[in-house]
Amino acid sequence: MLEAFFGDISVVGVVIICGLVFLAGYVDAIAGGGGLISLPAYMIAGLPIHAAIATNKLSSAMGTIVSTWHYARSGFIQLRLAIPCVLCALVGGSLGAQLVLLIDADILQILMLIILPLTAFYVFKSKNFQQTDKESYPLKKTLIIAMGCALIIGAYDGFYGPGTGTFLILLLSGVAHLRLDAAAGITKVINLTTNLSSLFVFLLNGQVLILIGLLAGCFSIAGNFLGARTFTKSGGSVARPIIIVVLCVFFVKVIYDLASPYFL
């Protein structure tokens, strides 16, 4: 029955994707770093790497829409900064997505084996954000720095994705001298824009598995909702072992896929 909707993805694959994407949303809400779970989820379930990255953008965008709306309602998004950053993020996200489509799947898998642990280490190391008393820059200087961050990190997000929120908050608060709440708001706007712009590129190239992406997106929203309701100061201690287990399974799967043609 499920095969009629999800094609070559098995029932077990659908369960793996939905379960891990739910877990990713939960982890993201309490400690961040959910992308380190959601992207490997699709590959563990057997999706080709380009389809995994593309479909992950769809489910991620659904969750990001909800969180961005929440930040907007709370007044954390400054339009005079957000609008120029959106334009730069559109360019960056599109370029990153186009670049990843040019890379051979085997090479991309090897890159993932390098990038994923480095990103995980940096996200773990940078989890304790604190408000600093840095003096604000003039609007023009803040705008230039924020737009540069949107372009560069936007390209990274279109190419790969996990850790984007962490990198943006650190740069916008530490380099652009935005208040932490304002940095978080602009981060959500940039992240949503890069998700949508890269998703558009992937859709045009037929890489997105729409039905499984929409289903997983619903689980992502549910995980974020539950994580937000059960937020705890020990969130990092909950997230780390979950992410490590998922990454270990992912590593075994990718290494097996790369090595199997030489032994079978």
Image (cartoon, rainbow, N blue to C red):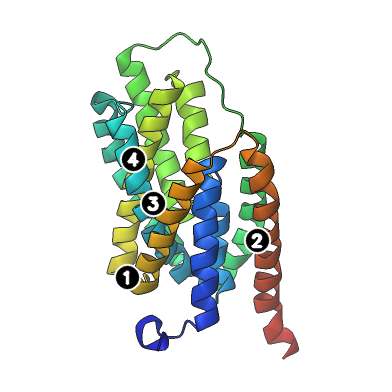
Give the CA distance from mark 1 to mark 2: 29 Å
Q: Position of residue 170 (x, y in %)?
A: 52, 29
Name the residue beneath numbered marker 1. Answer: 205
Q: Quadrant of residue 182?
A: top left
Q: Amino acid at mark 3?
A: Gly
Q: Would residue 61 be visible to someone looking at this image? A: yes
Label 3 close to label 2 by CB (< 8 Å): no
Amino acid type at mark 1: Asn
User: Which residue is found at the position 57% from the left and 63% from the top?
Assistant: 40
- Label 1 residue SS: loop
Residue at image coords 47%, 53%: 223
Q: Amino acid at mark 4?
A: Thr
Residue with the mark numbered 2: 246
Residue receiving disc 4: 68
User: Where in the figure is residue 49, as x and y percent of width and height?
Assistant: 51, 69
**In which quadrant will I find the N terminus?**
bottom left
